[in-house]
Image: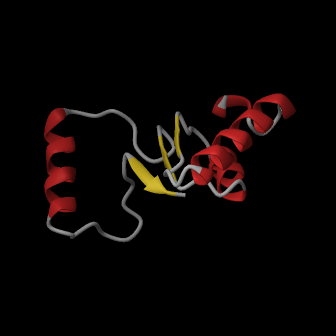
């Protein structure tokens, strides 16, 4: 659904409805598979809470991921550093 959210009205409607349902149920709306700035922008417009996907971070070596997680645990994430998921 997220893949075509910018171009397919049907996909946009389903994602929009899913986000509204989550919020009505007092749940956090999480979009998976976000790959572009345009998709993140649409999700922001729809008030999606969190997104994850290649837009923020691509798979990497275990050492890189371990170092990233360690630095985030210490609260030392530097400005502009990508993350595997992020608030939208």
Q: Could you tell whether 32 is left or right of 71 in the image?
A: right
Measured as percent of width and height from the top left, residue 25 is found at 56, 49
Residue 33 position, x and y percent, is: 53, 33
Q: How is the image coloured?
A: secondary structure
Q: Residue at x 50, y 50 (%)?
A: 27
88 or 15: nearer the viewer? 15
Q: Quadrant of the N terminus?
A: top right
Q: Nearer the viewer, residue 87 or 54?
A: 87
Q: Position of residue 63 (x, y in %)?
A: 13, 39
Residue depicted at 28% across the width and 34% down the height? 60
| Front residue (pair 59, 45) | 45
Q: Is residue 39 left or right of residue 68?
A: right
**From this viewpoint, which residue is outermost toward the front?**
25
> Which residue is found at the position 30% from the left and 69% from the top?
78
Asked whether, in this view, residue 79 is left or right of residue 11, the answer is: left
Horizontal arrangement in the rendering, residue 37 relative to residue 30 (left or right) = right
In percent of width and height, residue 62 lies at: 17, 34
- Above or below, 46 against 80 in this view is above
Query: Where is residue 2, by image quadrant?
Result: top right
Quadrant in the picture for the C terminus: bottom right
31 above or below 50?
Answer: above
């Amino acid at each position: 659904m997220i893949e075509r959210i910018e171009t397919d009205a049907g996909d946009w409607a389903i994602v929009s409805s899913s986000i509204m349902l989550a919020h009505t149920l007092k749940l956090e709306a999480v979009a998976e598979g976000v790959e572009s700035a345009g998709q993140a922008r649409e999700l922001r417009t729809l008030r999606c809470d969190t997104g994850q996907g290649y837009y923020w971070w691509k798979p990497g070596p275990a050492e890189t991921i371990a170092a990233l997680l360690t630095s985030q645990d210490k609260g030392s994430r530097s400005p502009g550093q990508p993350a595997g998921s992020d608030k939208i």
